[in-house]
Image (cartoon, rainbow, N blue to C red):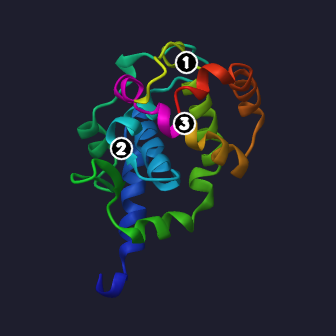
């Protein structure tokens, strides 16, 4: 692997191993990679775990859906790591981001999926009931700050029919949600 030769093959083989895992592990690993590759800023560990726990179509957040970071690291087969200083999740190397960008079909609807996830999170009953102060909100629902800031950015990059209804619901309750930002 002199000068990066062979890295593409190693990444391809690892992605194939990820896809070959049983259904839920493969799904979580690919979703993790999508979020890490396409988020607007590095995600904190708790933010990522909450993003992955969102159930499309649900009005409630189920804390039992929150994956543990060691499991996600395992499912991703070494392609992600936790920056211990910043407590953020990142790709193992910048060349992986370059490799993934050469396969646009891998995460074909990343931004619309991310926008939809953010909107659903902001419309969750638990988020609607948060106190108006950001510190308690970030402790109990750590993904709220990212969602509040970036749902529109993701939607603008790739708007879809799936984001229309939750965005209208969010906008109709603007006063409640603006206090969480």
Is any part of residue 9 visible from this angle? yes
Provide the residue designation for mark 3: 147
Q: Position of residue 121 (x, y in %)?
A: 54, 26
Magenta segment boundaries in residue numbering: 135-146
Where, by quadrant of the figure, is residue 56 drawn?
A: top right
Which quarter of the picture shows residue 94?
bottom left
Q: Earlier in the sequence, mark 2 or mark 1?
A: 2
- When asked about the image quadrant of residue 166, the answer is top right
Asked if disc 2 and disc 1 are in contact, CB closer than 8 Å, the reply is no
Mark number, residue 124 = 1
Q: What's the distance in space between the residues labelled 2 and 1, CA to CA?
A: 20 Å
Label 1 or label 3, whichever comes before in sequence order: 1
x, y percent for residue 177: 60, 24
Residue where numbered disc 2 is placed: 44
In this rendered view, identify the residue nearer to me: 102 or 128: 128
Mark 2 or 3 closer to N-term?
2
For the residue carrying disc 3, how many other residues have a C-alpha within 10 Å: few (<14), some (14-19), or many (20+)?
Answer: many
Which element is circle 3 on? helix
Q: Where is 7 relative to 65, above or below? A: below
What predominant SS class does the magenta segment belong to?
Answer: helix
């Amino acid at each position: 692997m002199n000068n990066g030769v062979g890295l593409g093959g190693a990444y391809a083989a690892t992605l194939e191993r990820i896809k070959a895992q049983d259904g839920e592990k493969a799904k979580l690993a690919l979703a993790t990679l999508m979020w890490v590759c396409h988020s607007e800023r590095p995600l904190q560990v708790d933010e990522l775990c909450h993003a992955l726990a969102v159930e499309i179509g649900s009005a409630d957040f189920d804390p039992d859906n929150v994956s543990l970071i060691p499991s996600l690291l395992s499912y991703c087969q070494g392609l992600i790591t936790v920056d211990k200083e910043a407590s953020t999740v990142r790709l193992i190397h910048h060349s992986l981001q370059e490799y993934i960008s050469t396969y646009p079909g891998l995460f074909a609807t990343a931004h619309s999926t991310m926008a939809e996830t953010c909107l659903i999170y902001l419309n969750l009953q638990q988020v609607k009931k948060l106190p108006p102060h950001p510190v308690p909100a970030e402790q109990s629902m750590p993904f709220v700050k990212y969602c509040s800031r970036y749902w529109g950015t993701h939607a603008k990059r790739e708007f879809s029919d799936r984001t229309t209804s939750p965005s209208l619901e969010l906008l109709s309750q603007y006063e409640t949600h603006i206090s969480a930002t």
